[in-house]
Image (tube, rainbow, N blue to C red):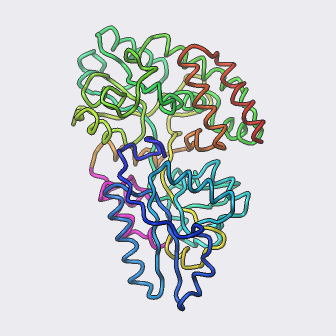
């Protein structure tokens, strides 16, 4: 994933040599030398994930003599590029990273992945609804989650106190009041990486959820029509925020993790809030030093009169899918890495947040535990829109919302542009 999808850390590629013609020759490999070979493509190139994944392979091979797991570890963008190529040819790895959403739906439509509700057994029952949701297509699960998280507001408690803000906002009007109060105290209310587009799409997406509701987003995905009045109102609410000039100077040209970017402003105490995923504390610390115990978290506020509610969350995670032609041992492998012992090691290492309620207690950081608890108790879940929809549609969401921030597109034009691309793709 780009920085958000995310990891949001500098990735150190530990790419292994690719097997000739990708990983789609599992049936032939299964008969070679009387053993079984599983090709596993993943994006776990950074620590601690890389070490955890290597240990999973070692443990699985020890418990399953005659089974060999061939690993291809790729940086996010390289992975997406390779997968686009091999998906077009139908030559899939046996097990591969997935973020669900539109890309997975295309793979399902092409008959390239296994139905895990059929072969996954009771393992599929252990995941929280929010964690499993991105990997469902037409009600059927085609992926297994390994971690899950959500977007919300990370805020500087010390700056809130300095401005006299005593409570975090739970409604949109309260949020706007907090923004104005921070401005009146000469504090930059919000850091935003406008140049990269995807951080900005969080605002419109959450507002669309809060105003129009999750059902409206689901309907739009099926009808390819994003002109719902609630989506237009989402843009109007976003312009309402932008007109308060809450962002840092030059935000339209700002990056996310650069020395003067969004995360650095938060990490150095120069902005009071950022709307970002669960990786935010780590990136803030890397880019700006971090603010320690002054960092807090609160969910995106409700919009008064809207169809959505505070307990509905927006986010995503990392998971794995199994190719339709993979041997049964590939299914065994993804079930193995989903067992409590393996998942506990993953969560305890800090590699990601849990996908089961039982593992929440393993999260030590209090703010991240709030994120995990909020995810587990979510009344509804929406995958990042630039992943939930086909790539071209998701890209248009990002671009159109960026134009809205820049003041060169109206709320109506945003919905019309997204609809146009969705209809062309559909």
> Where residue 111 sits: x, y (%)?
72, 63
Does residue 139 lie above or below 16 as drawn?
A: above
In depth, the one of 361 and 143 nearer the eye is 143
In depth, the one of 36 and 299 nearer the eye is 36
Question: Which quadrant holds the C terminus?
Answer: top right
Judge left or right: residue 137 versus residue 354.
right
Judge left or right: residue 229 versus residue 380.
right
Please report the residue visible at 46 percent of the width from the left and 80 percent of the height from the top: 68
> Which stretch did the figure color magenta?
335-364
Does residue 197 lie above or below 339 as drawn?
A: above
Does residue 249 lie above or below 89 as drawn?
A: above
Return the residue found at the far bottom: 34
Judge left or right: residue 262 versus residue 210.
left
> Where residue 377 sits: x, y (%)?
47, 47
The stretch drawn in magenta includes residue 345: yes
> Where residue 293 sits: x, y (%)?
22, 36
Which of the 4 quarters of the picture holds residue 246?
Answer: top left
């Amino acid at each position: 994933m780009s920085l958000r999808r995310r990891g949001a850390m500098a990735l150190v590629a530990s790419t292994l040599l690719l097997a000739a013609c990708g990983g789609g020759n599992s049936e032939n490999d299964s008969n070679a030398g009387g053993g079984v070979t599983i090709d596993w493509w993943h994006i776990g190139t950074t620590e601690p994930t890389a070490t955890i994944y290597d240990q999973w392979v070692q443990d699985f091979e020890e418990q399953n003599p005659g089974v060999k797991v061939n690993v291809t570890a790729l940086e996010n963008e390289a992975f997406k590029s390779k997968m686009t190529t091999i998906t077009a040819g139908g030559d899939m790895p046996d097990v591969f990273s997935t973020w669900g959403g539109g890309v997975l739906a295309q793979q399902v439509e092409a008959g390239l992945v296994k139905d895990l509700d059929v072969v996954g057994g009771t393992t599929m029952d252990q995941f929280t609804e929010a964690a499993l949701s991105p990997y469902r297509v037409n009600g059927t699960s085609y992926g297994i989650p390994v971690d899950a998280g959500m977007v919300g507001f990370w805020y500087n408690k010390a700056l809130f106190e300095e401005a006299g803000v005593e409570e975090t906002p739970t409604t949109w009007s309260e949020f706007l009041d907090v923004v104005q109060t921070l401005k009146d105290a000469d504090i930059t209310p919000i850091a935003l990486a406008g140049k990269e587009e995807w951080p900005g799409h969080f605002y419109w997406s959450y507002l669309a959820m809060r105003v129009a509701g999750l059902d409206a987003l689901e309907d739009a995905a099926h009808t390819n029509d994003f002109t719902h009045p609630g989506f237009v109102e989402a843009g109007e609410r976003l312009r309402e925020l932008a007109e308060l000039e809450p962002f840092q100077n030059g935000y339209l040209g700002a990056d996310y993790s650069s020395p003067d970017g969004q995360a650095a402003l938060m990490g150095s105490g120069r902005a009071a809030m950022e709307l970002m995923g669960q990786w935010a504390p780590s990136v803030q610390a890397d880019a700006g030093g971090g603010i320690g115990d002054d960092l807090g978290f609160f969910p995106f506020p409700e919009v008064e009169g809207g169809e959505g509610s505070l307990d509905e969350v927006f986010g995503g995670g990392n998971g794995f899918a199994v190719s339709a032609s993979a041997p049964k041992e590939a299914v065994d492998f993804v079930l193995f890495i989903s067992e409590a012992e393996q998942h506990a090691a993953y969560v305890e290492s800090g590699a990601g947040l849990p996908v089961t309620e039982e593992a929440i207690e393993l999260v030590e950081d209090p703010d991240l535990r709030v994120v995990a608890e909020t995810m587990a108790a979510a009344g509804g879940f929406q995958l990042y829109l630039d992943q939930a929809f086909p790539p071209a549609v998701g890209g248009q969401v990002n671009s159109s919302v960026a134009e809205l921030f820049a003041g060169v597109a109206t709320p109506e034009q945003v919905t019309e542009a997204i609809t146009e691309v969705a209809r062309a793709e559909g």
